[in-house]
Amino acid sequence: MSAVMGALSTSKDIAFSPEMEKEEEKSNKNSAMGEPSELREGDEAEKLSRKFSYASFCSMEDGDDEENDEPEEDDDAKLKAEKELDLGPQFTLKEQLEKDKDDESLRRWKEQLLGSVDFSAVGENAEPEVQILSLSILSPGRPDLVFPIPFVPNSKGYAFSLKDGSRYRLKFSFIVSNNIVSGLKYTNIVWKTGVRVENTKVMLGTFSPQQEPYTFELEEETTPSGIFARGSYSARTKFIDDDGKCYLDINYCFEIRKDWPSPS
């Protein structure tokens, strides 16, 4: 503290020379005319920095858009790459259930984990099998429309027809056999005149093998309405599990029309 006070008192005793006064006048003159060149250069650098930061932000946004527009096949490639990882030896469900069967705590834990397993649907294969049986269209006030899979198109080439502006639900029926299927996922992409208009992904869940079919209903949707919404649509539906195994991959066409088709 004393050193600082001494420095301040010493600075008061220093007299300004004429040269120093001229430099001070010159400095004041430059300040009146505008900012020093060093400051102006700093401002320009800051402006450029802001421009680059904004450009980087825009490119990140564009990159996100491109990322969102990646084709569905990229997801399949990722799942396939994950599946190729060495996870060690696989056991059939029967082998898993019979291992450590004398250990009461392990037996209870397996029962809690696996739930009620239908042993008649358990095979010797370690790979699970999923068979998609049918698609049902449920619409309020109308009888259910049930279509076996694979679809049998009508004379116009459509798997089914929907009325525009109508509420409906999709319900799938499927059987799981051999082993537990983990993370079964439903994906559906719809195009109209070559333009993608819908991309749906729904996680159905994990299912143990059983002889009785499972059913899964999707959330209620409403078909688009108006003259421009009517016409032919093409779609691709897939069922895939967490390991990237595809159990169904079908392409088909359907129609949105002014009225429901008359019952055949």
Image (cartoon, helix red, strand yellow):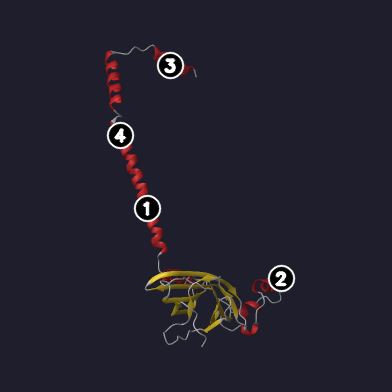
Labels 2, 1: front one: 1
Q: Classify mark 1: helix, strand or loop.
A: helix
Q: Which of marks 2 and 3 is nearer the N terminus?
A: 3
Q: Name the residue under label 4.
A: 40
Labels 3, 1: front one: 1
Q: Earlier in the sequence, mark 4 or mark 1?
A: 4
Q: How many numbered marks does the figure carry?
A: 4
Q: Classify mark 2: helix, strand or loop.
A: helix
Q: Mark 2 points at which residue?
A: 105
Q: Is residue 10 above or below residue 47?
A: above
Q: Distance between the residues labelled 4 and 1?
A: 27 Å
Q: Where is residue 46 in the image (x, y as percent from the top left)?
A: 34, 40
Query: Quick one: label 3, few (<14), some, or many (20+) residues within 10 Å?
Result: few
Q: How far apart are marks 3 and 4 (CA)?
A: 32 Å
Q: Do the residues labelled 3 and 1 touch (CB within 8 Å)?
A: no
Q: Do the residues labelled 2 and 3 touch (CB within 8 Å)?
A: no
Q: Distance between the residues labelled 2 and 1?
A: 57 Å
Q: Mark 3 points at which residue?
A: 8
- Amino acid type at circle 2 is Ser
Q: Name the residue under label 1.
A: 58
User: In the figure, is residue 30 to the left or right of 225?
Assistant: left
Q: Which of marks 3 and 4 is nearer the N terminus?
A: 3
Q: How far apart are marks 2 and 3 (CA)?
A: 83 Å
Q: In this view, does 56 lie above or below 217?
A: above
49 or 259, which lies in front?
259
Q: How far apart are marks 2 and 4 (CA)?
A: 77 Å
At x 41% / y 76%, what residue is drawn? 231
Q: In this view, does 222 lie above or below 57?
A: below
